[in-house]
Image: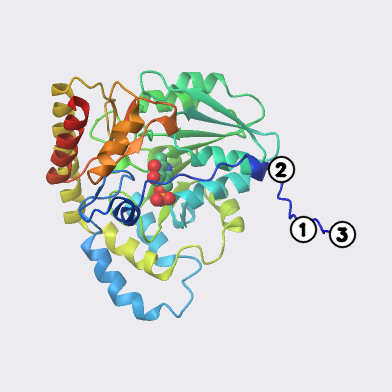
Amino acid sequence: MPVDNTITPKDCVSRLVPYSPGKPIAEVQREYGLTDIDKMASNENPLGPSPRAIAAITKAVGAIHHYPDATSHDLRHALAEKKGLPVESVIVGNGGDELIQLLGITFLRPGDRMIMSLPSFVRYEAAGILNEAEVVKVPVRDFKEDLDAVADRINDRTRIVFVNNPNNPTGTINTRDAVTRLLDRIPPGTLVMLDEAYAEFVEDPDYPNSVDYVKEGRNVIVLHTFSKIYGLAGVRLGYCLARPDIIDNMNRVREPFNVNVLAQVAGIAALDDDDHVRNTLKVNSEGKRYLEREFERLGLPYAKAEANFILVDVLRECRPVYEGLLRKGVIVRTGDIFGMPTCLRVSIGTPPMNERFIRELEAILKG
Ligand SMILES: Cc1ncc(COP(=O)(O)O)c(C=O)c1O
């Protein structure tokens, strides 16, 4: 008699969709026999890591036989000082991704409602599904998160509202007024995650300073990452800022050694790397203007980006355009995975990367 040896997961696991990351450079090299690849698919820093972080990692690497400091004491103190908050208001994680999952595990009960925008960062939905919550998706309007419509969907079961500002994949922001209006409608018992993974790139003066919401004692948790502006996506480091009671609950659930030795020292060093931040912002701002001008010349609509990527409508099915770019060694992201089948999301690169992307895109569109 054959034995049924199937190990059955929890019901919600079968509803989880594995994350589809930007195609890695090595894979494109293998598949297309190319050597010179530009990855403009994962909103990484095109200048590379913070040099100060590289130096700190090099110095610390001989100590990796030790467990990391389980409290990330120095890193959390550095963050608290920089943000003007008590250290009890800071939690760090193995990337922002871990903190989104931790938030869900800590606060979502089966049957609770969580609200997010469509399209927005897909990991919010995973946090909802994993915890058997009802996931409500509110469509963006003119590429922007519609926070009034989000507020309209809050009911007495709503535990978490995700606001992604700037929103990935559209790159647009909501202003201080719009965010405050939403927060003013948040009932007790509902927590708003303000995911600001791209905050440092925002140029619009009406963008909120979300630390103020934390200082006011509101039901908010602000998420930031070292993956973008500091160029540390590979070591995995993110942090959240919130009232100490919110952080305390997440700390009970957190894995003790969730942030590794190298990420901790890299984070502290990167926070002080003003030159790298300044250079990154300059390259991003100039690259954004260049790409916007070129999209206008090519007659392609695009969303007004306040991040380090732009969503552009190529006015035809995006997959063949994406594949044409891949064959030429340029990796971008297709909009079909976000429900925008004629769009591409392109990370802003250095001038040579941006020019190569436009050259190849134009050849494909005219070809
Ligand atoms: C909107 C948003 N939030 C959070 C993250 C998580 O970043 P990480 O896990 O690299 O810190 C990302 C990564 O791309 C993102 O786009």
Q: Is residue 263 above or below residue 81?
A: below
Residue type at numbered disc 1:
Asn
SS at mark 2 in the image: helix
Residue 223 visible? no
Q: CA distance from mark 1 to mark 3?
A: 12 Å
Q: Using a 10 Å C-alpha cutoff, classify the residue at mark 3 as few (fewer than 14 neighbours), some (14 to 19) or many (20 or more).
A: few
The quadrant holding residue 235 is bottom left
Q: CA distance from mark 2 to mark 1?
A: 18 Å
* Residue found 51% across the figure and 68% down from its top: 70
Q: CA distance from mark 2 to mark 3?
A: 27 Å
Respond yes or no on whether mark 3 lies under 8 Å from ligand 1. Answer: no
Contact, mark 2 vs mark 3 (Cβ under 8 Å)? no
Residue type at numbered disc 2:
Asp
Residue type at numbered disc 3:
Met
- Residue under pointer 3: 1
User: Left of 178 or right of it: where is 91?
Assistant: right
- Residue under pointer 2: 11
Residue 5's mark? 1
Q: Quadrant of the N terminus?
A: bottom right
Contact, mark 2 vs mark 1 (Cβ under 8 Å)? no
Give whichever of 212, 161 is nearer the camera.
Answer: 161
Q: Using a 10 Å C-alpha cutoff, classify the residue at mark 1 as few (fewer than 14 neighbours), some (14 to 19) or many (20 or more).
A: few
The quadrant holding residue 76 is bottom left
Residue 94, position in %: x, y? 46, 58
